[in-house]
Amino acid sequence: MKLITAIIKPFKLDDVKAALKAMTVEGMTVTSVEGFGRQGGHTEMYRGAEYQIDFIPKIKIEAVVADHDVARVVEAIVEAARTDKIGDGKVWITPVEGIVRIRTGERDDDAI
Amino acid sequence: MDSGNVTWILVSGALVLFMTPGLAFFYGGMVRSKNVLNMLMMNFWCILVVPLLWVVVGYSLSFNGKGSMLGNFGRAFGRGFDFGGIEPAVMIFLATFAAITPALISGAVADRMKFAAWAIFVPIWSLLVYVPVTYWVFAPKGWLRARGSLDFAGGTAIHVNAGIAALAMILVLGKRKGWPRDGAPPHSMPLVMLGTGILWFGWFGFNAGSALAANGVAVQAFINTFLAASAAGLAWALVERIRNGHFTNLGVASGIVAGLVAITPGCGYVTSMSAIAIGLIAGVVCSFAIGMKFKFGFDDSLDVIGVHLVGGLVGSLLIGFFADPKGLGFDFTPGLFFGGNLQLLGEQALANGVTMAYSFVVTFAIAKALNATMGIRVTADRESEGLDVTEHVETAYNNAERTMGRSH
């Protein structure tokens, strides 16, 4: 089992969700986050004074998938989230030691 | 009793009362989300405390008397009024003016003033500064008015007075931690725009209501209020577009308020095209005036000095050029452009100079006295954490869907 974490542009969330649903990924968790990478922040202007905004809004998606699904799920996220412009985000993969579905008590691959 | 006049005065009183919550949102949107409730409370405090003080002694000392310097107690405790005339309506209408004047100062002291000190500052300042200045400028026998200076709705007595008091306060209070290195952009521009709209709406009562009658002067003041605000908002927006490349909401809001401030003293003394000119001039001048604080190093958080002091001075001095008794159809000194000489401009300069000197010195003394006794500034930790939680034990935005455990 692997945890797939993706940071994407907020307006790409619907595309990514549709792509993952289409390949029967059973669930995902979405969080509004702020951060910066190579894209950096942006500037805002209030009463003529310029403010450097370093942390810009992004969406973090988390989904746990079985090992044999990892490659195509990552591929699907990358395809759906890409705009070819700076700030498209990143996807990373983390090993997961165990899962429990709270309602039934099912474990690991059965709980995905 | 003229029912039309009394109706208009009472409706105007309600309109002006609404300006203080409007100002609270205008300022509240501009501060960070950890300090917004403190800002709202500073403003609402003024409409709790000042109207009581006004009816008990404030009005009587500000308007009722035959001397040149200060009124007497003839109308104290709400007594001595003839309810067959308009005076009691005028008295309560003016309570809302007294309330919003110290509220204007809150924008300068934002993010760092101890609330207990503000709570005491407001009534003291009202009695020691607002009351005498109002008598000099507005009361029939007040010495600045008797000399011939003009202030229709409160440019000198309210905006210049509060603007210079704001400067005295922040010189005692000091800069916010990290200012000017760390910026504090507005936490909610929609609140700022909403507050601006409410201020504009209420300002029709402030200016046109100051005719104290439902007549042609009130109509001209209403028109002028509308035009000057539009013109100044437009001017500020254009300055920003040319200077910085964009039209900004905050620029438009600031311009509208600057225009409203600037037309306040002259709204019943100038005609429509002059109101547009005053608005355009105020919008441009104030959009540059707000940069002064960075040059001189005083931390006027929300530009009370750049907008209210400068806007009030611009509007008050421009009466010396634009006052037009023939156009308005009643008797007062004409300005330079309408058949007058430099006499009116001189009186305007004197009235504002005296007001600034008196208000600055007395406000500075009040701030020093409060600082020496109770302290006027929150601790550095409280300033960092935010005044909403530390001063008022409340949070503006409880977004999480959580319950809170009740402690006993």
Image (cartoon, coloured by chain):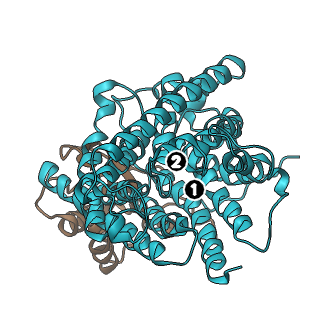
Chain colours: A brown, B cyan
Query: Which mark, residue B112?
Result: none
Instruction: Using the image, determine if residue B242 lies above or below residue B295.
Output: below
**Of helix, strand and loop, which one carries label 1?**
loop
Q: Quadrant of the N terminus of chain B?
A: bottom right
Q: Nearer the viewer, residue B52 or B254?
A: B52
- Mark nearer the viewer, 2 or 1: 2
Residue type (three-letter) at the residue carrying disc 1:
Tyr
Q: Which residue is rendered at x = 60% and y = 52% of the image? A: B140
Subunit under mark 2: B
Residue B184's spot in the image, x, y percent?
A: 39, 40
Q: Which residue is rendered at x = 40% and y = 49% of the image? A: B186
Q: Alpha-carbon distance for marks 2 and 1?
A: 33 Å
Q: Nearer the viewer, residue B265 or A20?
A: B265
Residue beneath label 1, please? B397
**Of helix, strand and loop, which one carries label 2?**
helix
Residue beneath label 2, please? B158
Residue B118's spot in the image, x, y percent?
A: 65, 36
